[in-house]
Image (cartoon, grey):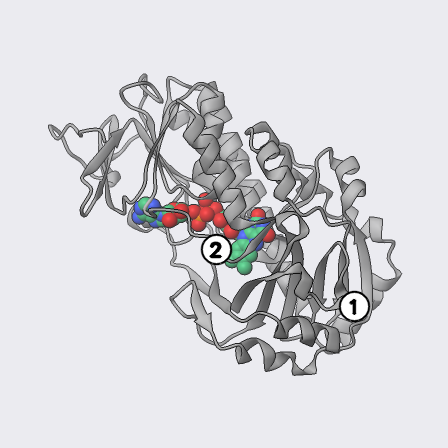
Amino acid sequence: MEQADTSTSGTMTDVRPRRHPTVGNERHPLLILGGGIGGLAAALALAQHGMKSHVIEKRKVYEPEGAGIQIGPNGSRLLASLGVADALEPLAGKPDLIHARDSATGATLARLPLGGWIAKRHGAPYWVLHRADLHQALFDAARASPLIARTTDFDAIAVENRGEHVVVRSRSSGEIEGSAMIAADGIRSMVRDEFFAGKPLRFAGKCAARAVIPATAMPKSLAENATGLWMSPKAHVVHYPVRGGSEVALVFVRNETAASDDWSASLQSSWVTEPARAFAKSLRDLLDVPAEWKKWSLYELPPLPTWVRGNICLLGDAAHPTLPFLAQGGVLAIEDAAVLARMIARRPDDICQGFTLYERERRPRATRVVAAAKSNGSIYHLDGFLAQARNAAMRISPPEMLMARYDWIYGYRA
Ligand SMILES: Cc1cc2nc3c(=O)[nH]c(=O)nc-3n(C[C@H](O)[C@H](O)[C@H](O)COP(=O)(O)OP(=O)(O)OC[C@H]3O[C@@H](n4cnc5c(N)ncnc54)[C@H](O)[C@@H]3O)c2cc1C
């Protein structure tokens, strides 16, 4: 671990944009706080531009998190350019379609094309992955890069700006110094809370439960190579194949009056099965399968005044947490990483300018995706006449036309 120079000190609020001749070099790598999806992707993207970084992560190891992640073509394209597609390809589910149904009746509302159709349209596949597989592939690629240093088991409790250098400190593992910092420390970002004046996280009125089951446990009537989407007024369900089709990831989202702080709380299965009593039998059968569900609360963040303070910037969920109803939060973090590395490489002598260019390019995109995800959640939970109108529109619209409405998401090139 590097030793910090303690000869000067300052606080984040002192920081003014300044030129940075040393960014990403041998002595002062760029610090990346958070070795999640966005942090590791940022390290890999910087390495592609020949820049050194140091990823600092509080976890000791990546425990398998029992949840899946959908990666649209805008994300799989970037995973390929980061060099992790070959490792992920055998593990990825490649659903042929999104099968949208009414939860109560089980009736099909639309069969939206994925598979070859979306790969051809956007030049990259639609993948569904186990989250642990994605983390592992990014982590292995980072470990193999001579340009990426990593420190795990380092729970950052303070960040200090010392003029041209940034120091991050933990309670028990000392401190690490770098030329600048990318804060990719997730939805509960310590850096954001401490230095980026903004409104606090707001409970979105919904909680999600997740589980992974063997594919062999899938009810026979639901056995198809598809992402399943079931809609009802108070809850919706998404499921898709992961680990090359050997397992199925399930997410159950329902309205809730209060948030729980534990993001990974074990759950009484009745939280899922109780509201599911009104659902079609095949869906009830599916929701009965998991022996254990993990629950977490969903939050929104009012837009921040800025993502950049001097030589510190925010990335991924730290900057723009996204409700999961478009399956884009992780992909947005990967897009951020690619753009950020490109902008820093464009202005290697001026990190603050690189950060500013990054925010300028990424903020409109992230804002639009965040809003669209929220709106999708409302559409999934429509009730009464509005739900009937939604269902009718989905039934009569050509499926390709429904999917084409998302071209702006999947066709994006970071
Ligand atoms: C129900 C649900 C389903 C989702 N489904 C999808 C999907 O299908 N597709 C998709 O693209 N996205 C999905 N997402 C969103 C996605 O998981 C997040 O947007 C993504 O993980 C954000 O990446 P990140 O790197 O910004 O943060 P994270 O992946 O959360 O990483 C943050 C990292 O920082 C570390 N850290 C935090 N604080 C500190 C500290 N003080 N010191 C050191 N390290 C620290 C953490 O341990 C963690 O490793 C979903 C989210 C939810 C809630």
Badge 2 is on which residue?
Answer: 65
* Residue beneath the point at 81% across and 57% down: 111
* Residue beneath the point at 20% across and 37% down: 175
* Residue beneath the point at 38% across and 54% down: 188
Q: Position of residue 213 (x, y in %)?
A: 60, 62
Q: Position of residue 172 (x, y in %)?
A: 18, 46
Marked residue nearer the N-terminal end (1 or 2): 2
- Tag 1: amino acid: Ser
Q: Which of the numbered marks, if any, corresponds to residue 166?
A: none
Tell whether 398 sits left or right of 204. right
Q: Nearer the viewer, residue 132 or 411?
A: 132
Q: Quarter of the image containing the N terminus?
A: top left
Q: Position of residue 330 (x, y in %)?
A: 53, 46
Residue that protrudes farthest toward the left in the picture:
7
Q: CA distance from mark 1 to mark 2?
A: 28 Å
Badge 1 is on which residue?
Answer: 221
Q: Position of residue 201 (x, y in %)?
A: 41, 59
- Tag 2: amino acid: Glu
User: Any atom of ligand 1 within 8 Å of the CB at mark 2?
Assistant: no
Tell whether 145 sits left or right of 88. left
Labels 1 and 2 touching (C-beta < 8 A) = no
The total number of labels drawn is 2
Element on which disc 1 rests: helix
Residue that protrudes farthest toward the front in the picture:
216
